[in-house]
Amino acid sequence: MEMNMSFSHDMGDEYEKFIRRMNPPRVVIDNEACKNATVIRVDCANEHGILLEVVQILTDLNLIINKAYISADGNWFMDVFNVTDQDGNKITDEGILDYITKSLGPESCFTSAMRSVGVKQTMDHTEIELTGSDRPGLLSELSAVLKHLKCNVVNAEVWTHNTRAAAVIQVTDEETGTSITNLERLSRIKALLCNVLKGSNKSSLAKTIVSHSVTHTDRRLHQMMFADRDYEQTGDDVLEDRQRPNVDVVNWYDKDYSVVTIRCKDRPKLLFDTVCTLTDMGYVVFHAKIDTEGPQSYQEYYIRHVDGSPVKSDAERQRVTQCLEAAIKRRVSEGLKLELCTTDRVGLLSDVTRIFRENSLTVSRAEVTTKDGKAVNTFYVRDASGYPVDAKTIEFIRQVIGQTILKVKGSPEDVKSVSQESPTRFLFGGLFKSRSFVNFSLVRSYS
């Protein structure tokens, strides 16, 4: 029986490869058809997950998708995307245009019916996935423990939503600069990080794994927070109705579709987040229309479950609605945006986030990247007490870290101007503690 199943699977793969060879993808990039956007048309054989892959490639290039029309009913997939760069200009860079053509066109390397949806390949670091309850100072504590364990953070993505936190952290060995493979050492890293996540509440749910997955980081974070059920409503979810995404799910019985409409404030990567969620929940998008007018985005999807059925019950409808709302809100950048750009060194993330913590700032989202010896880190910070961020606190932190190194990128209204009775006056003492003492105390408390 196993041999027959394997034979059937292999035959299925060969047939799919044959179909793709006979119907190679076609990509047309047109800078003349639209006055204010580059138009990208993609035609190819239809496969589950293909829409997510196309959107992911465009999103990873930091392109803004202003409009899109998707049709994938039957065996053929046809997409039209109107895209611009971050400044609202057409795409004229030949390197980017060539990359899009090669990534989506006949030269792209598709190895299975599912392709490489959401996949990235790298083996030069160890990837650690963390999920648990969010609290002020959590990233600081995690990075301090990693520093003590001689782990250098080379890349990291941290999201928080609805009292939950998820992180994908890529580390290397401090001495060798390569991935960590010693099983005993990996077990100790996992145990200490798990203790950090649990904090004083040893019964709280926390999960730390060393991942061998090559899933795209953003997609993996969505999957982790979904598995952690961050979409469930809590008393702490106090987003005002005017800020809450408007998600509606109704059935079109004549065509056996469920129609999902989303109205919300537009932002980068919004389309990726919604398509990723629908795909990972097991829904197939047959038709879709995406339109952005000013600050607002409108998305309309015609979907069925992979088993061919529309949404079957009110409970399923509510779950789809809640999961899409959560997917949209996870990446909403609450707080003041700070950007750090400097020469990379071991312990940099630990030192910076320690200064944030000691000045009563909590990190709601973080993107940490290093390349060619340079660190470019983006933090979204809030006052740990829930008040607007104190302008004097930010200015003091910039003086400590370096005003040319740490820059404010957020909106001025995210910062509160204060009188001379600034709370920063009693925070100075903690900043000049020995870093090794602070880290040592943290590690001892979690051992």
Image (cartoon, grey):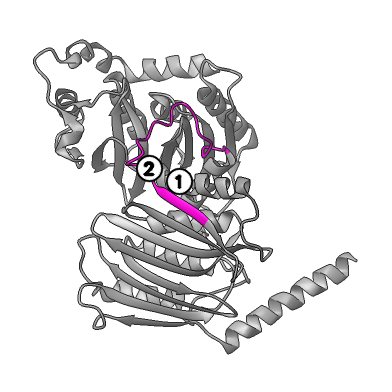
CB atoms of marks 1 and 2 within 8 Å? yes
Q: Dividing the picture into quarters, in which one does residue 203 lie? A: top right
Under tag 2, what secondary structure?
loop
Q: Is residue 9 visible?
A: yes
Farthest residue, direction left: 420
Farthest residue, direction right: 1
First of labels 1, 2 by sequence position: 2
> Which range of residues does the magenta coloring cover?
228-249
Q: Is residue 216 visible?
A: no
Give me the disc on residue 244: 2
431 is higher (above) or lower (below) than 337: above
Q: Main secondary structure of the magenta part?
A: loop
Residue at horizontal 30%, vertical 37%? 380
Looking at the image, residue 107 sits to the left or right of residue 384; the answer is: right
x, y (%) of residue 303? 55, 64
Which residue is tagged 1? 325
